[in-house]
Amino acid sequence: MLEYRFQTFITNIAQISKNIQKIKNKEMLSFGLRGTHVMCLFYLQNNPGGLTAAELSKLCELDKAAISRSVSELEELEYVTYQIKDDSKKYRAKIILTERGMWLTEKIDAIIEDSVNKAGMGLNDAERAYFYKALTLISKNLQKMAL
């Protein structure tokens, strides 16, 4: 029984992760972006005061080089900008969404909402609430074990 639970758990988590990445990449193509940009934009949208590259790296759980590349691409496309104060360095500056970036995140929010709704089809509200509660608990337990 344990072997079945382990296999089911690992297989499903891996498939969910791969499919989410595929969906992010597919949906972002129309904006000329990749899936890695989604999380940067998401966290910047939820932190209107801006985030440093280090903060963004931690939240997105991506290394600083990946964040640097993503932010540079987003800046080039005028979705983000740096709030550089006085003589501070760019790497310490807060990254914020531009007007164009805010417009884009609204579009992405609609895509995310649609995707989450489709992914949860067949679940009633109570099942959905229990699923997220269980998933969060499992994630926290695994995180503690990984330390």
Image (tube, rainbow, N blue to C red):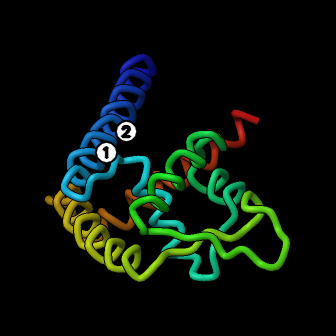
Vertical position of residue 43 compared to residue 102: above or below: above
Residue 10 x, y percent position in the rendering: 41, 27
Vertical position of residue 77 compared to residue 50: above or below: above
Residue 58 x, y percent position in the rendering: 67, 52
Residue 42 x, y percent position in the rendering: 46, 66
Q: Are marks 1 and 2 in contact (CB under 8 Å)?
A: yes
Indicate the amino acid at tag 1.
Ile
* Label 2 packing within 10 angstroms: few (<14), some (14-19), many (20+): few
Drawn side of residue 122 relative to residue 38, left or right: left
Indicate the amino acid at tag 2.
Ser
Q: Observer-nearest residue: 121 or 43? A: 43
**Residue farthest right in this picture:** 87
Asked where in the image residue 51 lies, by quadrant, the reply is bottom right
Drawn side of residue 55 relative to residue 133, left or right: right
Rendered image: mark on residue 20: 1
**Number of numbered discs overlaid on the protein picture:** 2
Q: Quarter of the image containing the N terminus?
A: top left
Q: Observer-nearest residue: 147 or 9? A: 147
* Label 1 packing within 10 angstroms: few (<14), some (14-19), many (20+): some
**Residue farthest top in this picture:** 3
**Residue farthest front in this picture:** 87
Asked where in the image residue 118 lies, by quadrant, the reply is bottom left
For the point 21% across and 46% down, which residue is it? 26
For the point 58% across and 48% down, which residue is it? 67
Q: Secondary structure at mark 2?
A: helix
Rendered image: mark on residue 17: 2
Q: Observer-nearest residue: 127 or 67? A: 67
Drawn side of residue 15 relative to residue 123, left or right: right
Residue 45 x, y percent position in the rendering: 48, 75
Q: Observer-nearest residue: 115 or 77? A: 77
